[in-house]
Image: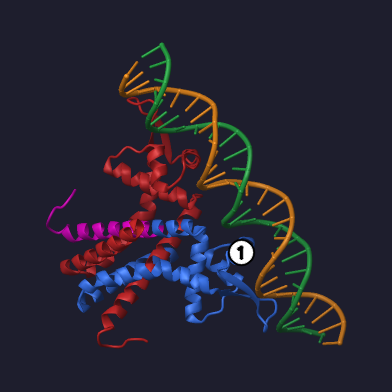
Chain colours: A blue, B red, C orange, D green
Amino acid sequence: MGTEQGSTGAVDSSMRLVHLLRALTVELDLLGGEFANVNGLHPTDLRALIHLLDAARAGIEVTPGRLGEQLRLNSAGTTALVDRLERLGHIRRVRDTRDRRRVLLVVEEGAMELGQSFFGPLINGMVAVLGDFDAAELAVARRFLLAMTQVVTAAREG
Amino acid sequence: MGTEQGSTGAVDSSMRLVHLLRALTVELDLLGGEFANVNGLHPTDLRALIHLLDAARAGIEVTPGRLGEQLRLNSAGTTALVDRLERLGHIRRVRDTRDRRRVLLVVEEGAMELGQSFFGPLINGMVAVLGDFDAAELAVARRFLLAMTQVVTAAREG
DNA sequence: AGAAACACTCTCGCTCAGCGAGATACTAGA
DNA sequence: TCTAGTATCTCGCTGAGCGAGAGTGTTTCT
C-alpha cells in the first residue's frame, strides 16, 4: 500500500480525502464538546441550542415536542433538557395563545450572543482562509461537500 | 440577501460552504448514532472502537490510559468503557509482558468486521462519487479540507 | 352543547455513563 | 530494600435519558 501510481491513484486520493473528512468531523466534535464544557452545557444542550438558533433565524416556531423529535429524545428527556436550558437563562417557555396546549421555546438574547461568540470566530476564520480559493475552486469544494452529504444521507436511509 | 454579485460574492459562497460543512457533520453524527444504537453501543463506545481500529491498522498498541485520554474520560469511566467493549466481545484485555502494570487492548475479529460493515459501504460510496472528480479537483477538495481542519484545530487551541 | 377521542407537555421511578477519590499492582531509582 | 512514580481498577455518587402514565387543553362526532 502507500502511494503507488497508475489506475489506483484516484482511489488512493479519494480514500485520503475520506479520512481527512472524518478527522475534520472529529475535530469539530471535540471543539463543540469543549465549548459545551466551558459553558456548563452538555453535548445535547449544545445541539439543542444550535437547532433553536437556526430555527429562530429562519423564523420557525419551535415547541418542546419538535425539539425532542429532532434530537431523538423522548418527552421526559425533552422536558429535562428544556428545564436545563431555561434554568441557565438561554430560553424561555411561552404558552402559545392560539393552541394553549402548546409551549413555544423562545431563545433569549444571551443565548444568541453565546452562539455568536462560539460560531462567529470559527466562521470568520473559515471564510478568511477560503479567501485563498477562487470562484472555480469554491465551486469544486461545494460539489465535493454536496457529493459527500448525498452519500451519507443515502446510507442513513438504506 | 441571496445571490448578489460583486465583492461580497466570495464571502457568500464561503458562508454557504461553511453551512454545508456543518450540515454534513450533523448527518455523519446522526449516522454514527444510528449505527451505535443498532449494535447496542453508546456514542462513546463507537468513538472508542474507531480509535482502536485506526490504531490497530497503524500497528500502534493501545492501553486503557491512552484510550481514555483520547476520549477525554477519566480512569473510572475508561474502565467502564473497556468493560462494556470486552463484555460485548469487541476487544480483549491482555497484560503487557514487558511492563506488567500495563494492559493492552486488542481488537477482536468481530469488531473489525463490524467496522467494515459500517464504514466499508460508506467509504466505497464516497470513493465512487469521487470518481466524477479529476485529479485537480480532488486536490482542491483536499486543500479545502486541510484549510478547514487547520481553522478548527487553531480554534481548539486558542 | 356534551362526551369521547386526541394532542401536547410534564411527573415519577428507574437505568446506566461518567466523575472524584482512593485502593491496588507493578516498576524504577536511590 | 525502601520510596516515588505509573497504570489500572473499585466504590459511591451525580445526573442525562427512558418507559409509563398523569394532567390539561382542543377537536370531532353525535
Provide the secondary structure element on which disc 1 rests. Answer: helix
The amino acid type, in three-letter code, at marker 1 is Arg
- Mark yes or no: residue B66 visible: yes
Q: Nearer the viewer, residue A37 or B33?
A: A37
**Eyeballing the image, is A82 above or below B42?**
below
Quarter residue B109 falls in: top left
Q: Position of residue B55 (x, y in %)?
A: 32, 43
Secondary structure mostly seen in magenta is helix
Quarter residue B7 falls in: bottom left
Residue at the left extreme? A6
Q: Position of residue C30 (x, y in %)?
A: 32, 19
Q: Is residue A6 magenta?
A: yes
Check the picture and name the quadrant holding the C terminus of chain B. bottom left
Residue at 49% over, 42% down: B77
* Region of the chain picked out in magenta, as a range: A1-29
Q: Position of residue A42 (x, y in %)?
A: 51, 58
Q: Nearer the viewer, residue A33 or B108?
A: A33
Quarter residue B96 falls in: top left
Residue at 18% over, 50% down: A2
Residue at 29% over, 61% down: B149
**Eyeballing the image, is A58 above or below A73?**
below
Q: Which residue is mark 1?
A: A87
